[in-house]
Structures are given as structure tokens and as C-alpha cells.
Image (cartoon, helix red, strand yellow):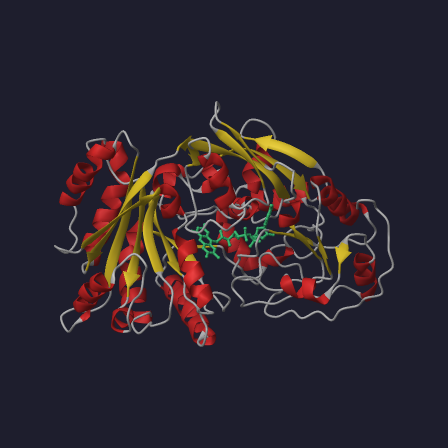
Amino acid sequence: LTPLLFILLDHLHTHKYYNCSSSASPSPSLHHHITKLTGISTNSTTIASVSTDFGRVIKASPAGVFHPLSVTDITNLVRFSYEGPQRFTIAARGCGHSIRGQALAPGGVVVEMRSLMRVGVERIRVCSTEMYVDAGGEQLWIDVLHETLKYGLAPRSWTDYLYLTVGGTLSNAGVSGQAFLHGPQISNVHELDVITGKGEVVTCSENYNSELFFAVLGGLGQFGIITRARIALETAPERVRWVRLIYNDFSAFIRDQEWLISMDQEKKKKGFQYIEGSVIMEQGIKSGWRSSFFSGGDMEKIGGLGGEKQQGPIYCLEGSMYYNNVTASKVDQEVELLLQDLSFLPGFSFTHDVSYLHFLDRVHHGELKLRAKGLWDVPHPWLNFFVPKSRIQDINLGVFNAILKNNNSMGPILIYPVNKNKWDERMSAVIPEEEIFYSIGLLRSGLHDLEYLEKQNKEILHFCDQQGIRFKQYLPRYNTQAEWMNHFGSKWDAFVQMKMKYDPRAILSPGQGIFTSSL
Ligand code: FAD
């Protein structure tokens, strides 16, 4: 470490670890070894702050927390574990916005990546001539956006929420309403700097060290710690025409969504640059379904649909058309033309006109409201999965209209289609086999009903298995290697080979629970 000195800390902790299969407590001698390292904090408040995550479903304490001041600090830490007599696990932690303990390091060391943010050290650099930004793995996407906007530029592909780190989302995929057009965030990266599990610093891209490059993208933190990503930029739009359309017919809803995501191939008229959708449950309407998008009057109108005649849920298609000063005069007409071809309920289109920044940062506005009500730092037993297009009707019938029929818990249920051809097969991320698949997110809060929601999640996964729906979980957390093998399918062998090559002592990202000992 910097410097690699030992200090004596006879501070032993008891480790709490629930619900995870990886080895929980280190031996007392290993614990002693870790807590002696310079720069490792064992302060109980610091330990507690990294012992759970946004999901608040799993808790596991590390032996220590490391606050690096430079990339070299992290390299030295990893080398120390890799080369030393006593291996210990290391988890890079972005913001800990994971759901099921993926950024935890039970009995190991958590690296607080955000410590790399220091005054005077430039960790976001825009190259406007070549249209890319170099961003540290610890950087928040909101900060990347602010910096790139200074040049009139912005990344093309986003997540719904921007207070996530670059390294964190690139370890998963980074999926939102732009993915149908530009692919997930991992499809928009030119180059990475990575510290492997051997403590080597490697620059990689599609053309050099490509094996590592593709392994790391969607690689769940298994092959290296991302310290820099070169991200593709486009000219940033200035404003966004943001539309929500209400449907009571699922077939019409998905037909329109699928038509919209295929439109740019047709080039007949301008389409949306962002497409998502959500399911609004009957109970949700009755119990006062809320969103900052809709006015009180709008909600009453939508709520009126939930009467006797409406059997089952209502669906909401969300689309955005980007524009700037030059194209502003045409946007009204373009949106109108587009809506003419869609089959939403007449009179049920709702529109906002907002700045691009406001649009991208929309979930943060919701966060502030939930925080004010004490509803942000609560359990989030979220379930995200990708479903092939051919089975989406089964999900509607078996999940939205049956298992979730009486769902009245808070939090959106997202559903939108994505084009598979925007994903590179060489990346570690796994997706269904069909050309179009749906991203489904049950983003429910479990303030009082965590156990009930977890039971329902299991029921949904069981239903999919029983029906032979070849879905893939997104942001998964499995307890056994057999489940991970099933998850990665044909990519599993390559995944293991990459692990043996770049992290053979299974040091990195232990919270994923994929590899629990040296290979
Ligand atoms: P962490 O949770 O801290 O880490 C996630 C994993 O990546 C861990 O295994 C960790 O060890 C590893 N890791 C972290 N940093 C690095 C690094 N630099 N190098 C290598 N590995 C690293 N996801 C979407 O795709 N689309 C969305 O629209 C979306 N919306 C969200 C909205 C909210 C409110 C929340 C809380 C999450 C959302 N997510 C979404 C999920 C998000 O992508 C994941 O939580 C992701 O893990 C990023 O969070 P983080 O940066 O805090 O990473």
C-alpha cells in the first residue's frame, strides 16, 4: 500500500453474513493480517456503511475498508493479496447501488472507489474533436453528463438514474430507453484501463487486449477493477419532448413499442430516441398512483380507467423525441405524425417539454421526494429480467394479470423492448437469444412487506421456469455455481477461462458469489 507499511491494529470484528454462499468470516489470522494494512479502516461506522447496499436485503461486513488516493494504491492492494501468503477478497464499491450484496466483501476489503475523487485531480476529460470522454471508474454518470454538456456533447446510452458509477454500470450493462437505438452502455465504450486480479494495469479495447476488454464489459467485476473508461459521445440535444401514452390493451401496447424500436430502419419519419414503458396495476390506480409526470387531473383521468370495465392492468408507453434550436420548429409536427400511427386510448396522451438535463436526471427528482418522506433508504427487493419477445404475452398473463394481480406495493414496473443486434456477443453480459427481447424491472420497495415481495419474486421466476421461458436475469445474485453456469449458458466456459487468466485467486468482487476460492 502507500507506503506498504504495517501498523498494528488488534481490532477484531464479528462478521455478520446472511443469505450468501461465499465464505463469510476470514480466519482470525487473515483478519489480523488485513486489519494491519496501512490505509485500511476498521472503524465500526465505516465498516457498517459498506456492509449493505441499496437493496438492504443482504448484510455482510468486510474486515476493512480501503480509501485509495490513487490508482496505484488500488494496484498495490490487489498485488498484496495476489502475491502475499494470505489471499483476501477485494470488492470495488461504486455507490453500493446494487440490490443483493454484489458490492460487498464478506470478511475481505471493500475499496471505496469514490475516494479517487480528489480536489484538483481531473478524472473526467472530454475530447470534443474525437467525440469521447475519458472518465474514472469511480465517476458518477451525472458528473460525466455535466462535464460533457459544457462541450455541447453527451454519452448516447444511459441508465434511468445517474447517481451510479461508470465502473458499476459497465460491470453490468447499463440499460435504459436509449438501448434499442444505441445498445446498452457497454456497447458505447472505446477503451478501458483495468487493474486485473493479479494487480496488473492493462489498457484494453476492441483492438488490443480485446479478450480482457470484452470480458470486463458486463463481467460483474470478476476480471478487473475499471479505473478509466473511454465513452462515445454525440452532440447533445437541447430539449426533449417527453410523451406518455396510456393503453388498456397489452397487444396494442407491445405492437406499438416494437414498431417504434424498429423504426429507424424504416427511415420514413422521425421516431423517438428513448422508449420505455410501464405497467400500472389496478390496485395502484385505486390507491392513488403517483408520478411527478402526471398532474392531479391527469391521474384522476387515468384512475377513471380502473373502474368496473377495466379488467387487469393499464399500460403506459413512454417515448422521447430529442430536439435543438434548429429542429424546434418541426418537433410538434413530428410528434403528432408519430402519434397518429399509435393505438393508445384516444385522449390519453400526456406531454412534457423539458431540458435534456432535466429529462436524463428525472429519477433524481423522485429520489429527493422519497428521501424527504423517509422512503428512499428502505429495502428494495428488485427483480430485473430479460424476456424473449415470443414469450412476453405469457408474462402479461401469468405475471402482471395473475401473480401480481393484487400488487399494491410502491415502485414502478417497467417493461420495454430492446434490439439484440445492439449488443456485442463477445461481451460477458448475457441476454436472451431472440432478436427482440424485453427488459422487465419490478422496482418495488419493501418497507413493510419485504418477505411477501421476495416470495412473489420467487414465484415469478418459478413460473418462468415452469413455462419454459428462456429469460435471463439482469443484475442477478445466485447462491450456487450451478445457477451461475445456467445463467451464463454457452458463455460459462469462456467466463471461467477469463477468470483463470485475470483473477486466478478469485480475489475480485466476491459479493457476486460466483467464485468462492482460487481456481
Ligand atoms: P456497485 O453497486 O457499487 O457495484 C456493482 C458491482 O460492480 C459490484 O460487483 C462491484 O464490485 C462492481 N464494481 C463497482 N465499481 C467497479 C469498478 N470500478 N470496476 C469493476 N467493478 C466494479 N441499472 C441499469 O442498467 N439501468 C437502470 O436504469 C438502472 N437504474 C437504477 C436506478 C436506481 C435508483 C438504482 C439504485 C440502480 C439502478 N440500476 C440501473 C442498477 C445499477 O446499474 C447497479 O446498481 C450498478 O451496480 C451500479 O451501481 P454502483 O455504481 O453503485 O455499483
**Viewed as shown, does residue 454 lie left or right of 405?**
right
Q: Is residue 210 above or below residue 218?
A: above
User: For residue 347, what is the image quadrant?
Assistant: bottom left
Any part of residue 337 in sight: yes
**Viewed as shown, does residue 255 lie left or right of 469?**
left
Q: Is residue 29 above or below residue 409?
A: above
User: Where does residue 308 sit, x and y in percent of width and height?
Assistant: 15, 74
How many numbered discs? 0
Looking at this view, is 487 or 114 the one in front?
A: 114
User: For residue 278, what is the image quadrant?
Assistant: bottom left
Looking at this view, is 321 or 404 the one in front?
A: 321
Residue visible at 75% across and 47% down?
77
Q: Is residue 426 above or below residue 246?
A: above
Looking at this view, is 511 or 466 the one in front?
A: 511
Any part of residue 433 in sight: no
User: Where does residue 365 sit, x and y in percent of width and height?
Assistant: 40, 56
User: Where does residue 435 sit, x and y in percent of width and height?
Assistant: 34, 42
Residue visible at 25% across and 69% down?
285
**Viewed as shown, does residue 53 lie left or right of 15?**
left
**Viewed as shown, does residue 250 lie left or right of 214?**
left
Residue visible at 20% across and 33% down?
330
User: Where does residue 63 sit, x and y in percent of width and height?
Assistant: 73, 62
